[in-house]
Amino acid sequence: MTLVYDHESPSEKLQKKKKHLVSDFISGKERSFMKRHSRILNDYFMEKFKSSMVDPEIIDKNPYAIIALGGYGREEQCIHSDVDLLFLFEKNVPDEAEDIIQEIVYPLWDIGLEVGHSTRSLKECVSLSGEDFVVLNSVLDARFICGMSILYSELMRQIREKVIRDKSDEIIKWLVQSGIKRHGRFGDSAYLLEPNIKEGQGGLRDYHAMLWIARIKYNIKQPRDLEYYGLLSHSEFRILKEALSFIWNVRNRLHYIAGRKCDQLHFEYQTELANALNLRKQNGLQPVERFLSKLHSRMEVLKQQYLMFIGEQGYTEKSKLSKKLNTQTQINGLEVKRGMLNFVSSEAILDSPDLLIKIFEESARLQVPLSSEAKRLLKEFIYLIDDDFRNASFALKSFERILFAPSTTIDVLNDMLSTGFLVRFIPEFKSIVNRIQYDEYHIYPVARHSLLTVKTIKKFGMPDEDKAGNQLCGSLYKELSSKRLLLWAALFHDIGKGEPTGGHSQKGAKIVKDILKKRGFKKSDIETITFLINEHLLLIKTASRRDLNDEGTVIACAGKIKDIERLIMLYLLTVSDSISTGPTAWNEWTSALLRNLFLTVLNILKKGELATGEAVETVNKKKEEILLSASLLQEKQKLERFFEVMSPRYLLYTSAKDILEHIRLYKKLGDTDFVWKVTRTSDSNRPGLFSKIAGVFTLNSIDILDTQAYTWRNNIALDIFKVKPPLDQIFETERWDKAEENLKSALSDELNLAEALKEKMSPYRTFRPRTSQRPNRIVVDNESSVFFTIIEVFTYDFPGLLFSITDALFRCGLDVWISKISTKVDQVVDIFYVRDFDGQKVDSPDQVAAIKDAIAEVLPGRG
């Protein structure tokens, strides 16, 4: 199609051409958008150069060239990228240069383009490039547009002869160090929730650094020369091009959606991008999770290619390798050169395929990294890993030595993952590679998280970890006799997440059972590993969602674990899993809850159900009280015999008065089938008190962090709320006074809290989270507690949530005795221990359904 624009200025033509081009790109018609975008800019500059009104006599005496720099120079012009220009003059920059800028650049600003320009003489440009490598970088991407072409050629010749020739090593070292600083600032984009697709590790800037280094060292002219000069293999260049194509597509669409230059992939853009790429739900992955999986895998390609490239050029962090330069391997077929491990030849691999795993084992043992050529050969010969290789005893022993090797700067397991070896050796691992969980909780893809969990466990006991507050984990790990089984469980603990639906722990345990059977593991070892995988969430769920003051909860937990060694392994796995998930999953509060639960369960497993000092003391006092009721020695002996047949749990949770009454009933039983006694209980304390307190706090904009509710035996309610202090510290006292008056009014029914809160809460009723659209979920549990029905509400937080739920519970005739606030991924989990107004659990199906409906009605998103 040819577009004709009559009677229009060059900038208006450019604007229309760009609008049409962007439209074609967004609709999928334009495959070479960045190159076409660069070329319509070229057309504009050439037309403006030809029609310039600046005195031609002055230009003839001091000719100039317009040169594209940066992304424009590379013909990578994205939708809202800056247009970087150099106006290069043969001699000193004339006064008329300002007129040229006004003619050419100002109209671009008028149509909203971001234009960065510099005006320099040839001599000045060469001098600045030698002094400031940032300036040199932009010149390395220079491309002639129009004007005096010989000026451009002379600039590039002088840059090479006067700057690059004498300073090439210094410049490349600066580029590598700048990359390290950039990665430190923007993070590893291959694993971030909101990656920077340009500046982060694995971002486009890593590719640019490869080009700059190749231009400096080998004088390449175009990206294809990376292959022609042998810097990348044919397949590596093809894979790199595919990765870049995807990332550029994402970057352009991100610019379009954001309406501006934007390289940070914020949550609010991710779902829209997934839709723009026409991705659909597949294998249990939401479209946005598929998008992020694809993006992370491409950025991982870019990251690994960059690391291999600078390593082959000899510009890795030599300080870390200097101590290993003289290290040698004793394995035939392997060698250490320049402090890096490699195969002697490709023939050696064909003769001894076991070298494919031995090179990793040797890397772990010697603490020497794999060379880029070794990684290349691993990918080339990975087909040799078949079922015979996988199930061979030598391969298993070698892999276990790698798994068991101390955690250091040489991350061998990660190398196994990035080269494809790990997936080939354990095919079941493939389903979790680059699998993203779309929330603000999980930082890493599942496979990377699994490897990090292994690494975290192996760090326990190291000095840095002890300083970080993990002394308990360190001492437990050092004394653990089953480290091998724990590390296998850590490697596989999330493998079930590759399955599309269902509980990943149970599915993972089943998958791993089959994996271990094929590899000849002992039955007892398989049972231990699969138990750890199946129950790896038990401790953290119990610690964060159950009342740890309830001995029944802790005893049930101990009953499920049964064995002290298993408890220690489960605790270490839980801590490392949480630490490796991210800061949202692991903090001082979580650490303290988990440690307290672990120590309590450990004590129970060591001493039995009545293990805690409080429990033992409680039972002994009850026995003494009961024995005091007997006046004769013979009666006391009979009572003591009753104690022998009573379960420990019964003795712990039943009052002395009730035990005596139950003994009397037992004596009446005789030969009859049953005996009963009907007792009228006193009225409960004020129902709905808890929800009214929560409502008053919401009304006064006081955020609730945690709660506990108790009822004394004299029917006095004690509700404890941990809250954030009011934001306005100056008027804090007035705020508390107002809240107190509101509570008095609410308790006397003078204040209708539901009506008072309606306006404050209405904006949040249709709230949707910025990441995943996980549905609200309500669980009614009548199994975990002897005395209470436990209600778990999974939803998204908003002001007044606690009041809304507890008010719904009150309207269902339920009294809240204990409340806990926890988290699951990016949702809040509110847990309530409740009884009905008669003091009973709620276990009829109709009651449970009514409770769920009442709560669901008040949750966000319902409207």
Image (cartoon, rainbow, N blue to C red):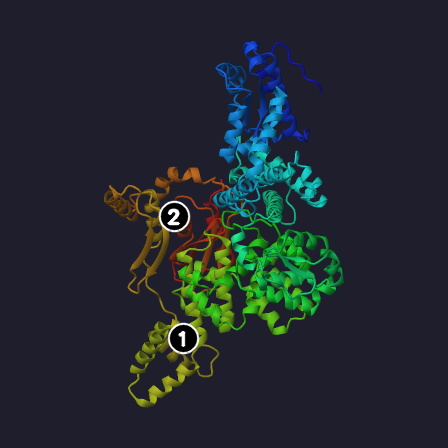
The residue that disc 1 covers is 610
Q: Quick one: label 2, few (<14), some, or many (20+) residues within 10 Å? A: many
Q: Is residue 554 left or right of residue 845?
A: left
- Where disc 1 sits, the SS reads loop
Distance, label 1 to label 2, CA atoms, is 37 Å
Q: If you read the primary sequence from the N terminus, does the residue marked by circle 1 or circle 2 appear first?
A: 1
Residue under label 2: 803
Q: Position of residue 773 (x, y in %)?
A: 54, 44
Q: Is residue 59 above or below residue 615?
A: above
> Which image quarter holds the N terminus?
top right
Residue 526 visible in the displayed image: yes
What residue appears at the point 42 percent right and 44 percent down from the top-left corner? Answer: 798
On the image, the x and y values in percent for residue 156 come to: 60, 29
Q: Position of residue 120 (x, y in %)?
A: 51, 23
Residue 523, quarter of picture: bottom right
Q: Is residue 290 left or right of residue 323?
A: right
Q: Judge whether 211 appears above or below 512 on screen.
A: above
What residue lies at 65% left-to-right and 71% top-to-bottom?
Answer: 521
Q: Please, what is the three-letter code of the amino acid marked with disc 2?
A: Phe
Q: Amino acid at mark 1?
A: Leu
**Nearer to the camera, 196 or 489:** 196
Nearest to the observer: residue 691 or residue 54: 54
Is 601 placed above or below 319 here?
below
